[in-house]
Amino acid sequence: MTTLSQSTAATAPSIQTSPSHSLRPLLVTVFTAKVVVSAFLLATVSFAPPVSANGSYMATMN
């Protein structure tokens, strides 16, 4: 014979919280730094003036 508390405990979902990983803040910081650096590099490339490669290579050959 089961009691009411035993039957509800068997059917209730058990909530298990996983412990937070200790290196998660470091991982988020590294990913954020990568995004910032890549945005900076793309910005510097986009602001660079166009250069004709043929002219500069020919000048060094003379």
Image (tube, rainbow, N blue to C red):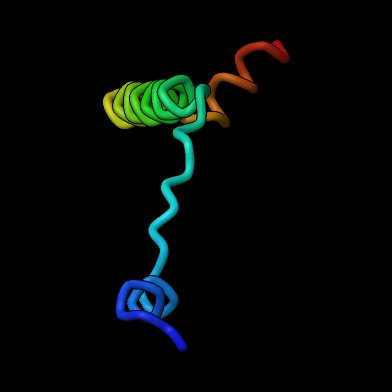
Residue lying at 37% horizontally and 27% vertically, measured from the top left: 32
In the displayed structure, would residue 13 be above or below residue 49?
below
- Is any part of residue 49 visible from this angle? no
Q: Nearer the viewer, residue 7 or 29?
A: 7
In the displayed structure, would residue 26 be above or below residue 16?
above
Q: Of all residues shown, which one is farthest toward the front?
A: 1
Residue lying at 34% horizontally and 24% vertically, measured from the top left: 36
**Image position, residue 58 (x, y; %):** 64, 22
In the displayed structure, would residue 25 be above or below residue 8?
above
Residue lying at 27% horizontally and 25% vertically, measured from the top left: 47
Q: Is residue 29 left or right of residue 61?
A: left
**Image position, residue 52 (x, y; %):** 47, 30
Q: Quadrant of residue 53?
A: top right
Q: How many marks?
A: 0
**Image position, residue 23 (x, y; %):** 52, 23
Question: Looking at the figure, which quarter contains the C terminus?
Answer: top right
- Is any part of residue 34 visible from this angle? yes
Q: Quadrant of residue 40?
A: top left
**Image position, residue 45 (x, y; %):** 37, 27
Q: Quadrant of residue 44?
A: top left
Residue lying at 46% horizontally and 28% vertically, measured from the top left: 24
Q: Is residue 24 left or right of residue 42?
A: right
In the displayed structure, would residue 10 be above or below residue 52?
below
Q: Of all residues shown, which one is farthest toward the bottom?
A: 1
Q: Nearer the viewer, residue 44 or 2?
A: 2
